[in-house]
Image: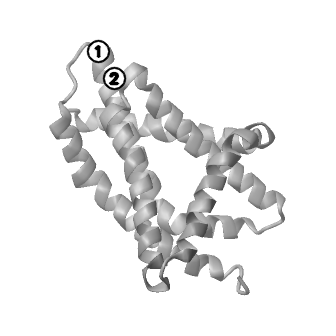
Amino acid sequence: MTTRLNLGRGFLLATAFFALSIAAGWLFSQEVEPFLRPGLENLVGAAEKSVGIDPELRSAALAGFVFLKNLSVAAILVLVGHVAFAVPTLFILAVNGAVIGLLARLFLDAGLPPLAFVAGVAPHGVIELPALLLAAGFAFALAGRRLKGKTVPGLSPRFGFLFRIVTPLLLLAAVLEVYVTPLVISRFFPGA
């Protein structure tokens, strides 16, 4: 099993790479927007489809969708993110970081207050992002073991890490994203 020190190093590497990806999304927003827009439109489309769901179930269905989307990303990171020199992990971090940077840039270019953007990300992001960065850090720690010629843990410890540590955090983040984040955002857009 990876040691805490290796997981800590992996987490720091994931965090640094993610921060650089956010900066790249911000700085190169015009260049990355054509590549990222279809994915963003798919997410918006899925959210809009939830409007057709019974209003009493809509929020729960949306929370379930957000949770399963994030859990699938975390599962990829924990289970196969270490292969091929952690290319899958680098790709996932780069795309997700660039999306945040792009959205921040588009938001601020539209003249909206920066604090409103933070309010739209922070309530759930303070849990969701560290959970995904832990999963990415785990992948980097496994890749580091493999590069040193050491064996990597089998599927059982990986599933254990995913379900004991990452999954509860992502479930809490999904609930916060659907039930709390809109309340915080509404303070900036009372008529919405």
Determine the image quadrant of residue 25.
top right
Callout 1 amino acid: Lys
For disc 1, the marked residue is 148
Q: Secondary structure at mark 2?
A: helix
* Residue sitting at x 56%, y 61%: 46
Label of residue 140 in the image: none
In percent of width and height, residue 187 lies at 65, 83
**In the rendered view, would you say 100 is above or below 58?**
above
Crowding near the residue tagged with mark 1, few <14, some 14–19, many ≥20 C-alpha atoms within 10 Å: few
> Residue 105, how many percent across, how many down?
75, 52
Visible in this render: residue 96?
yes
> Eyeballing the image, is 187 above or below 63?
below
How many numbered dots are placed on residues in this image? 2
Which quadrant of the view contains residue 113? bottom right
Depth check: 41 or 137 in front? 41
Secondary structure, mark 1, is: loop
How packed mark 2 is, by other alpha carbons closer than 10 Å (few <14, some 14-19, many 20 or more), is: many
Quadrant for the C terminus, please. Answer: bottom right
| Residue occupying the point 70% across, 55% down | 104
Indicate how the structure is coloured in the image. Answer: one colour
* Residue to which mark 2 is pinned: 144
Query: Residue 111, percent across and down?
Result: 84, 65
Is residue 66 found left or right of 48 in the rendered image? left
* Quadrant of image for the N terminus: top left
Asked if the residues shown at circle 2 and circle 1 are in contact, with their CB atoms under 8 angstroms apart, the answer is yes
In which quarter of the view is residue 42 placed?
bottom right
Q: Amino acid at mark 2?
A: Gly
Q: Is residue 19 visible?
A: no
Q: CA distance from mark 2 to mark 1?
A: 6 Å
